[in-house]
Amino acid sequence: MQVMDLRGLSPAPVTVFTCDGEVDYAANARLAKWLVSMDGVKSLVILGHAGEGTFLTEEERLNLIRTYVEAVDGAVPIIAGITGEGTKVAAEEAKKCKAAGATGALVYPNHGWLRFGFQKGAPQDRYKAIWQESGLQCILFQYPDATKASYDLDTQLEIATQDGVVATKNGVRNMKRWYVEIPEIKRANPKLQILSCHDEWLLPTMFDVDGLLVGYGNIAPELLIELIAAGKAQDYPRAREIFERLLPITRAVYHRGSHMEGTVALKLGLVHRGLLDHATIREPLKNLGEKAEAEIFAAFEAAGISRAKELIAAE
């Protein structure tokens, strides 16, 4: 198995819809091509939270994988969010994603665990079944500490050392746990790629990671690629400079009442950059309103981030 190289930026693209709410496959292909045109983008991770993956039908999800695979033409692997509740259901979902062209699986926890917690051994079996049934390379997804689906260290260590697990996307959002657990995971599997997904406060995690797997990668991939480079070089002043430049956008997109609002805000950011014509979403997401739209547009202006069409023309 040739392991996916995720040592850089892995954006989690939004799903683009038509004005009447259907998946706009041509527009999704354009977004994919723009993202992979940048040196430093290592994969595209679709069908997750930012991509409204659980709001799509199975047919739409599989067609979106095929669209992305065709659009990137082998430049980077396409990673699919696997969200099915039961272990068997998730494994079957992964098989279909593999057949559609996906290379990797971002393995979400069973969402019943968010409320009730998980039984010991169940997460490990979920990853094992997905790998054995589909052959998709798996990413260990660590949920926030505030949820009951955040894995304890022993569970993470067991998953991280299983066959087929090549990376971890860590969003624990508890720096006490981060500073204790990430070194232990690295010791257990030195080859495991460590990816942060702390969109709303990336700076503290930038010096311990191989890359980022973030929805933020939709709207400011150029600066995030620079931030990753600064972190790998242990160049704190440069990383801090980039962080401060991004801060108006971080506040406007991610410092909102609900993290789910971030998906809506991402689409508005893409509208401002000229990559989308409109920010159509699906229920249960709601529009943020004109005031929020103005705030997001102003944040891009404050950060000095140009319209993508101007960037492409300049090239």
Image (cartoon, rainbow, N blue to C red):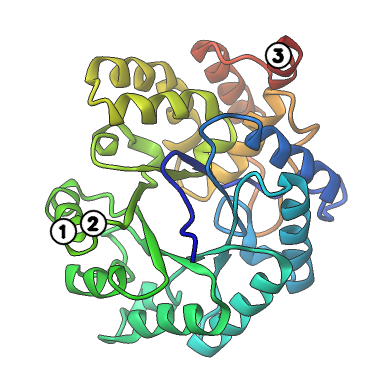
Q: Earlier in the sequence, mark 3 or mark 2?
A: 2
Q: Earlier in the sequence, mark 3 or mark 1?
A: 1
Q: Which mark is residue 190?
A: 2
What secondary structure is found at the residue carrying circle 1? helix
The type of residue carrying mark 1 is Arg
Element under disc 2: loop
Distance (Cα) linking label 3 and label 2: 38 Å
Q: Give x and y (percent) for residue 127.
A: 42, 77
Q: Residue at x 41, y 36 (%)?
A: 255
Q: Which residue is mark 1?
A: 187
In the image, residue 39 above or below residue 18: above
At 62% from the left and 59% from the top, the residue drawn is 47
Separation of marks 2 and 1 at Cα, in angstroms? 6 Å
Locate the C terminus by quadrant: top right
Q: Residue at x 21, y 50 (%)?
A: 174
Give the residue at mark 3: 315
* Closer to the camera in the image, 55 or 310: 310
Whether 266 is drawn above or below 314: the answer is below
276 or 91: which is nearer to us?
91
Q: Position of residue 220 (x, y in %)?
A: 54, 28
- Can residue 289 be seen in this snapshot? no
Q: Vertical placement of 108 versus 183: above or below?
A: below
Q: In the figure, residue 116 lies in which quadrant?
A: bottom left
Q: Residues within 10 Å of mark 2 (few under 14, many from 20)?
A: few
Name which residue lies at 50% across and 86% down: 86
Alpha carbon separation for disc pair 3 and 1? 43 Å
